[in-house]
Amino acid sequence: MRTLRDVKVGETATVVKLHGEGATKRRIMDMGLTKGVEVSVRKVAPLGDPVELTVRGYELSLRKADAEMVEVE
């Protein structure tokens, strides 16, 4: 299983599935990370947290813990 945390800077991936439950999963979906959407990794902070993404035409910063809940291909 490949997660959003495994995607390298400059790569694009497609969301396959969201893991997690309840409010956490809802928050990730509210940010635009839903099944089938393309996500590009723009940059990663020096210590690896957070990760800056481009989703649906806007920039999004996501913590590593949340990025691990997003399965991609």
Image: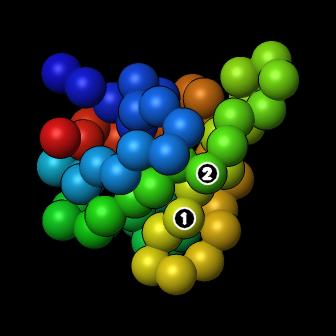
Q: Residue at x 54, y 38 (%)?
A: 9
Q: Residues within 10 Å of mark 1 (few under 14, many from 20)?
A: some
Where is residue 36? Give x, y as percent. 18, 65
Quadrant where the N terminus sits is top left
Q: Can residue 19 be seen in this snapshot?
A: no
Q: Using residue 41 as the reference point, say whether residue 6 is left or right of it.
A: left
Q: Using residue 1 as the reference point, say whether residue 44 is left or right of it.
A: right
Q: Observer-nearest residue: 52 or 27?
A: 52
Mark 2 element type:
strand
According to the picture, the residue beneath numbered tag 1 turns out to be 54
Q: Using residue 31 as the reference point, say whether residue 16 is left or right of it.
A: left
Q: Earlier in the sequence, mark 1 or mark 2?
A: 2
Where is residue 21? Give x, y as percent. 36, 42
- Spatial distance from mark 1 to mark 2, Cα to Cα? 7 Å
Q: Which mark is residue 42?
A: 2
User: Outermost residue toward the bottom?
Assistant: 57
Q: Observer-nearest residue: 68 or 11?
A: 11
Mark 1 element type:
strand
